[in-house]
Amino acid sequence: MITFEDVTKFYPRQERAALRNINLEIAKGEFVFLVGQSGSGKSTFLRLVLREYRATSGTIYVAGKNLATLNQWKVPTLRRQIGTVFQDFRLLPGKTVYENVAFALQVIGRPAKEIRSIVPETLELVGLEGKEDRPSDELSGGEQQRVAIARAFVNRPKILLADEPTGNLDPETSIGIMKLLDRINRADTTVVIATHDSSIVDQMRRRVLELRSGQLVRDQAEGVYGSA
Amino acid sequence: MTIAVIVTMAVSLSLLGAGAMTALEVNLAKSSLYNQVEISVFLCTENTQGGRCEEGKGTTAAQRDQIQQTLEANPEVSEVTYESKEVAFEEFQRVFADSPVVDSRTAEDMQDSFRVKLVNPENYAGVVSEAKGLQGVQAVQDLHTVLDPMFKWLSALQWATLTMSALLLLAGALQIGNTIRMAAFTRRREIGIMRLVGASNIYILLPFLLESLVAGLIGIGVAAAALTAGYWFVIVQNAQTSITAIPWIGWGDLATAILVIAAVGVALAVIPTLLATRKYLRI
């Protein structure tokens, strides 16, 4: 589903590579933790997958597409197959829970009838049934992240990327979010979580990719946060 | 979109349209007047000075025949007619019949002349300089010496109008760019999410394009109305009836001017919008 072949990424006017010679493959339906300190290259990895940036060298395949040769105007089509969740939720504060999730479908031109049936379904999946009409900025952090996950998943993407999804949440709430992401993974969605929350990584025991200064230093099945 | 943007657009486009119509009118008048250009070759009398005159002597009959033959031999010349001072005096009396100057001249004050019609009125310079070199020719006059300074001022006026409209158009474009930039900045969160979930660029851009296009179209409409009103009052109601010596631009030329401002107006609405939103649409 995601393949990196000898990928290096330099940012303009920076001498050190943000990512250096990365080779990895994430199969369809996998659940992967991407760990490493701040500045190790986790976010760069996610942004390369989203095609927000192009790799300086090497080849990236996402959902069967070579991102280096992907036409600029096809990028939106690529992104419809990827759901993304952030540490800061990135909801629209003036809108209700329902509107925030429906927004993701409206702006890609889905018919209203379809939206009316899919959105409540997805809100139920993330455990927000009954809160459809609450303004999103009145919810707790954990609930806001659930809205964000619902928005990322409502279009049933093949891949779900999460950048520090539990970074703003307390441990108990974090576990709930991880369970939700696990459930989404069971629906055959490839899930990639960039995090430095060691407790959730240790608890879940899934594949761990560790980045250090832009280099892949560990690829461990059923891994833990700190190197074993 | 603010009223300021619409007003700037309307005023600048009106000026542009007025400049374009002036240019069309000047060209029309120029070609019509210059096509009627005749050259007058004045001959010497005992009282004339300068040119190729001998002091105190008029042009002799032999010189006059020589001048006529030379002019008729020039391939650029289509017709040469002789106008004696008596004929010139009659014409003078007719033109100035109601004026007090009519009594101030006699036939002796007039000059004999040749009226020269040209094959191609644009190629007048060769005939004029040839005629000036002939013995017994006091002066050569053509309409260009009268019309050229006038057209020079008209074209200066026209350029001033176009320059002013260009500056105002620039101001309008900057205003539109600014307004859209601010609107996009206010909605940057929404735009960010749209890009993230894969909304197409045109979907994101459309509300901004519509906003600036509406302002542009109102500006174009106001300017077109102003131009039509100006055309009606200045040309149809006044100039056309009071000055018949030159042709005046028609409704078709007004339509051309309106098409020009419509094209410029749309470009001025769309281009700054595309530039202002580029930052938010970069993938």
Image (spheres, coloured by chain):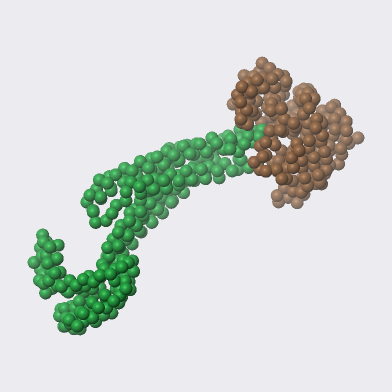
Residue A188 x/y as whole percent: 78, 27
> Which residue is more in the foreground, B256 or A226?
B256
Instruction: Name the quadrant of the N terminus of chain A.
Output: top right
Depicted A222 relative to depicted B66: above or below: above
Q: Can residue B14 be seen in this view?
A: no
Quadrant assignment, res B99: bottom left
**Quick check: A122 left or right of B141?**
right
Instruction: Name the quadrant of the C terminus of chain A.
Output: top right
For the view shown, which residue lies furthest in the right direction? Answer: A228
Residue sitting at x 58%, y 35%: B203
Which chain is depicted green?
A: B
**Quick check: B41 left or right of A82?**
left
For the view shown, which residue lies furthest in the top direction? Answer: A130
Residue A150 x/y as whole percent: 70, 25
Q: Can residue B279 be seen in this view?
A: yes
Depicted B15 relative to depicted B108: above or below: above
**Quick check: A186 left or right of A124?**
right
Residue sitting at x 69%, y 35%: A79
Residue sitting at x 66%, y 33%: B197
Residue A63 x/y as whole percent: 75, 36
For the view shown, which residue lies furthest in the left direction? Answer: B103
Residue sitting at x 19%, y 78%: B44
Quadrant assignment, res B87: bottom left
Depicted B114 relative to depicted A187: above or below: below
Which chain is depicted brown?
A: A
